[in-house]
Amino acid sequence: MKEVTIYTTAWCPFCIRAKMLLDHKSVPYTEIKVDGDAEKRREMTELSGGHTVPQIFIGETPIGGCDDMFALERQGKLDTLLSAN
């Protein structure tokens, strides 16, 4: 399974939903909290091109945010991305 990284803030409901989906699927992930951390937020923006949280990566590939991940799940593509080599 590819490594999953998710940039979050504590108060973001979309971050919570995204983590719940990953937890439901038993997908381990690394959470990087950007609350009040300008350096981590800048890192997130540079890597993903996105300014909002969550920003989710599967391997080195940014997939976008919560809605993007749920769309991949509905299309049956999320598991494929997680297991692809």
Image (cartoon, rainbow, N blue to C red):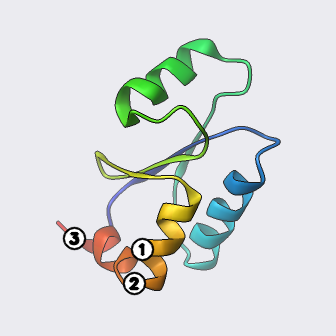
Q: How crowded is mark 2: few (under 14 residues within 10 Å), some or many (20 or more)?
A: few
Q: Is residue 31 above or below residue 49?
A: below
Which residue, as the protein is rendered here, is positioned at the far left? 85
Q: Disc 3 to disc 2, how far (Cα)?
A: 16 Å
Q: Is residue 52 above or below residue 77?
A: above
Q: In which quarter of the image is the N terminus?
A: bottom left
Question: Could you say which disc has been placed on residue 72 in the image?
Answer: 1
Mark before the other along the chain sequence, 3 or 2: 2
Q: Where is residue 38 in the image (x, y as percent from the top left)?
A: 61, 13
Residue plotted at (37% across, 79% down): 79
Secondary structure, mark 2, is loop
Q: Where is residue 32 in the image (x, y as percent from the top left)?
A: 58, 36
Q: What residue type is labelled 1?
A: Leu
Q: What residue type is labelled 3?
A: Ala
Q: Disc 3 to disc 1, how far (Cα)?
A: 14 Å
- Mark whose residue sits in front, 3 or 2: 2
Residue plotted at (76% across, 46% down): 12
Q: In this view, does 35 lie above or below 52?
A: above
Q: Horizontally, is 55 left or right of 19 in the view?
A: left
Mark before the other along the chain sequence, 3 or 1: 1
Question: Could you say which disc has been placed on residue 64 in the image?
Answer: none
Q: Which amino acid does label 2 sit on?
A: Gln
Question: Could you say which disc has been placed on residue 84 in the image?
Answer: 3
- Residue identifier under label 2: 75
Q: Is residue 76 above or below residue 52?
A: below
